[in-house]
Image (spheres, rainbow, N blue to C red):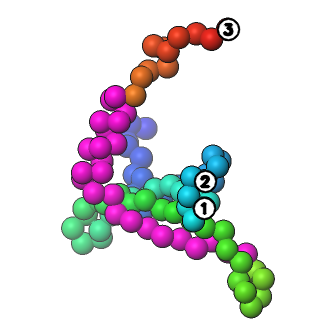
Amino acid sequence: MNEKYDNSNRGVLFRNEEPKKNPDGPDYSGNFSLKCPHCQKESDHRLAGWKREAKATGKKFLSLAATLISDEDKAKGEKKKQAAPKAETLPDFE
């Protein structure tokens, strides 16, 4: 039971609940990880999805775009996490 769960070649996609700042922004976003079967190197990616409707048939579908998360992007994300105030340090509002 102490085995680490292998999250390779898996990901998540969440509906964006907040109003879009950009009207062309994605309706869904998330991330996923891929492991190369040859070298076993893992790479992290962002995933974005837009709700679309086929002009010819009217069928609804998701249009997807994936981008590689660079090491610099990962470092920026870690800095933001460290700089963000912790919930317990915020004043109480009653």
| Residue type highlighted by circle 3 | Glu
Q: Report the Cα–Cα distance between label 3 and label 1.
A: 36 Å
Seen at 33% across and 29% down, the residue is: 82
- Residue pictured at 21% horizontal, 67% vertical: 39
- Say which residue appears at 56% left-offset and 58% top-offset: 22
Q: Is residue 73 above or below residue 2?
A: below
User: Closer to the camera, 33 or 53?
Assistant: 53
Q: Is residue 25 visible?
A: yes
The first of marks 3 and 1 along the sequence is: 1
Horizontal side of 9 relative to 30 (left or right) equals left
Q: Residue at x 77, y 88 (%)?
A: 57
- Residue 69 shows which numbered tag? none
Residue indicated by mark 1: 23
Tag 1 and tag 2, C-beta contact below 8 Å: yes
Q: Is residue 14 in sight in this rendering?
A: no
- Crowd band around label 1 with a 10 angstrom C-alpha radius: few (<14), some (14–19), many (20+): few
SS category of the residue bearing label 1: loop
What span is colored magenta in the figure?
A: 60-83
> Residue 89, position in %: x, y?
45, 13
- The reply to whether discs 3 and 2 touch (Cβ–Cβ < 8 Å) is no
> Residue 10: image x %, image y %?
46, 59
Real-space Cα separation, disc 3 to disc 2, in angstroms = 30 Å
Quadrant where the C terminus is found in the figure: top right
Q: In the figure, is residue 36 to the left or right of 89?
A: left
Q: Nearer the viewer, residue 41 or 2?
A: 41
Instruction: Verify whether residue 21 appears in magenta.
Output: no
Q: Quadrant of residue 52?
A: bottom right
Along the polypeptide, which appears first: circle 3 or circle 2?
2
Task: Report which residue position mark 3 lands on.
Answer: 94
Q: Mark 2 is on which residue type?
A: Lys
Magenta segment: does it hold 81?
yes
Residue, disc 2: 20
